[in-house]
Image (cartoon, helix red, strand yellow):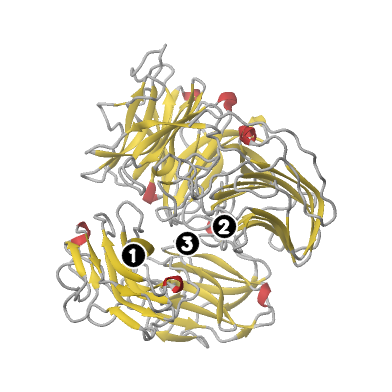
Amino acid sequence: MSSGRVPRHAPTRMIAAVATVCALAAAPLAPQATAADTSPYSETYRPQFHFTPEKNWMNDPNGLVYYKGEYHLFYQYNPNGNSWGDMSWGHAVSKDLVRWKELPLALSHDDKEAVFSGSAVIDWDNTTGFGTKKNPPMVAIYTSAYKDTGIQAQSLAYSTDRGRTWTKYKGNPVIDLGSKEFRDPKVQWHAPTKSWLMTVSLSTEHKVQFYSSKNLKDWKLLSDFGPAGATGGVWECPDLFPLPVDGDKKRTKWVLVVNINPGGIAGGSAAQYFVGDFDGKKFTADDKGSYTPPAGTVTQDFEGTDFGKWTTTGTAFGDKPAAGAVAGQGKVTGYDGTGLANSFHGGDGATGILTSPEFTVDSKYLNFKVGGGRHPHKPGTVLEQGDPPTGTVLADFEGGSYGDWTTTGDAFGSTPATGTLPGQQEVSGFLGGGLVNTFRDGDSTTGTLTSPEFTIDKDYVNFLVGGGNHPAGSENPTAVELLVDGKVVHSTTGKDGEALNWASWDVKDLVGKKARIKIVDDHTGGWGHLNVDHIMLSDTKARPVSQETSVNLVVDGKVVQSATGSNSETLDWASFDMRPYAGKEARIQLVDMNTAGMGHLLADRFTTADAPAKSVVQRADWADYGKDYYAAVSWENAPGDKRHMIGWMNNWEYGGSIPTAPWRGAQSVPRQMALRTVNGRIQLTSEPVDSLASLRRERPATADGITVKSTSKTLTGPAAKGKALDIEATFSLKDAERFGLKVRTGADGGETVIGYDTTTQELYVDRTNSGAVDFSDAFPGVQRAPLKAKNGKVKLRILVDWSSVEVFGGSGEAVITDQIFPDPDSQGVQVFAENGSVKLDRARVWHLNSYRD
């Protein structure tokens, strides 16, 4: 990478867009890299102004420190492959937080330890003795993840050449609690106490601990914080820093960032924060007070001796409400009164459905409490597994042999399995008495199983699959692959569960081709095995069987809204927006079709109301409301006492499956953080660093005074499209229910919708049709962030890169970061309004150069 010179373009004549003419003008687009390019950093989804390593896996940002004119970005890195593993610290530097230069590996894993996340400081006074006062050492404080014991402890390494070479401290570790869930130290100099301050996570306890040291080697525990806020997943990568409120340095508050996975606001990984005070020893979060849900009419509270008019199927819910936990279950909390619906009757292996009588929708919201397993409803599933579709069976693995299929390695054994293998959780969902099961001698075995060649003569390949989620193309896959001409054209993996379920490949475009099925188990770690059965050709797509634990709203026989638990025995509030179904007949169904861990559902207190109830997760504070902003931490020692933050632009729900190569993982743009009073509350806000504007081509396209009514209009002109854009737009509210911009639109119908919903006062990003979305069930969807219009206007800043959007609403109080994987030819921008009109007061669109130019 080069330091990056911004090309200058000659100014062009500006054409104003008026009325409903959606035209923009600016400098013509320079040629952009296409999927056919083979040079580094030109791959189909390669970000152009977000940092990515040239190759291999990257996740959490680490060691963020400024020294001698350089911002250092270390990061979790696998030097040996494109999936998570061999965790080490990669390294990049920048003079402006925009143009990055990748440097050689900084801290490497070894036979004893992996190098997990942490931080870096400049030891100006040489308190460690690792350098001199004239040449103070850069000291990394990281988590040693010991390979033999699984213990996580805090260790040091130091550099005396601006982070280019490193030495691990011989006295490591410097803090060891004997814990396997103790990680991600963030260290800073705390001037009032003239000592080093460490903020570190006890991840599964949902606690942050604070330690003090005079020399970075000897540490004293000060206090801890938590559990608090959202606790639906592990707490990781904490950060603590002060900020003035509304720019008033005499009024300073402290911000504690606690990243959580899963259990984030949009599902999976997210960056939570708390605002409060720190006295040098203890952090105290501001008191938000207790929560009272909206008043309403209770329609079912499960306080009776039976379910009343609600009907049951199966055995999971028993024959009456539960009085708390049932036999074999942990403590259940969060329900009201003495009774609740609890599907743990018979344990997680039992299934069943509890259905309300039909009712006419006459309220705005239906609020209720839900707990239990996190197994969402999946559209297109069926509640019971019927007969397979008609067609040609290629293999059913009955009869005690693999027939003319060929094996390599030892994972498949000499014959098909007959069910669950020794040491394995219960395997279910297969047909007949045989299946492929590569758990022979546990996950450590590997191998392949390949079919004879066959001709594709039907529209679909259907099969049952379960086991590990390690996609084809990752370093060590567990995958079912379809090979045509020796190349993988389709692949599917398990979902880290032993229950098999239907998967299908649409092969209409391959009819008449010769093909093979190859089952690959190349993974020796956790969930390093596959379960496969009943591979067939059919003209009908098999419908997978529901494995949900969910509360569903059913209208006209279809599930229109759904909520699930958070893998917790504590119930929390959830809400259905009933307004779209006013006057229609509906039912509530409590569905437990899951037989795996946390395969049960808890529900209580169904209440009609005029306002939605909010869960703990919704009441928590979030630095970003998108799916792809995690492990967010800030730079130490930045010039001007500014607080810049960056996050891993990915999500552990699907991070290993995103369709990028030879790299996997990107960082967000660095953001300038502030505390502002918004609607009477102090909020952490973020906006892109000012230096990002240096990547803008000289003259933007502009549009003024565009009015759109209940339609979408394409912005025309050569500058009104692109794959790397910086867009500023201001809208005046009229009567449209929803409005905004669509980016990366294309002839294939693909689009990413960036909108504002006036009915809920929310900013949203809809990526359900943004391109490649089928690599994970958790990827497509809509992310929302609360945002109130100001003086009747909504202001947006939108950063569009080759595989992401970052949306900043208002003054940075509502932020949504999402990855997208559109067709490279999808480069359009549209303005839209739904159910009414909106006025686009002004839009400016800049094309952004690559930071490597």
Residue occupying the far left of the picture? 414
Amino acid at pointer 1? Glu
Mark whose residue sits in front, 1 or 3: 1
Can you see residue 758? Answer: no
Residue annotated with mark 1: 481
x 67%, y 32%: residue: 247
Amino acid at pointer 2? Gln
Structural crowding at the residue carrying mark 1, measured as other residues with C-alpha within 10 Å and reported as few (<14), some (14–19) or many (≥20) = many
Relative horizontal placement of residue 114, taking residue 785 as reference (left or right)? left
Query: In x, y percent, where is residue 183?
Result: 36, 41
How far apart are labels 3 and 2 at the CA level? 19 Å
Give above or below for 101 relative to 743.
above
Give above or below for 493 relative to 584.
above
Task: Identify the element where label 1 is drawn.
Answer: strand
Give above or below for 125 relative to 764.
above
The answer to which quarter of the image holds residue 489 is bottom left
Give above or below for 674 relative to 809.
above
How far apart are labels 1 and 2 at the CA level? 40 Å
Mark number displayed over residue 778: 3
**Callout 1–callout 3 Cβ contact below 8 Å:** no
Mark whose residue sits in front, 3 or 2: 3
Amino acid at pointer 3? Ala
Can you see residue 340? Answer: yes
- The first of marks 3 and 2 along the sequence is 2
Residue annotated with mark 2: 618
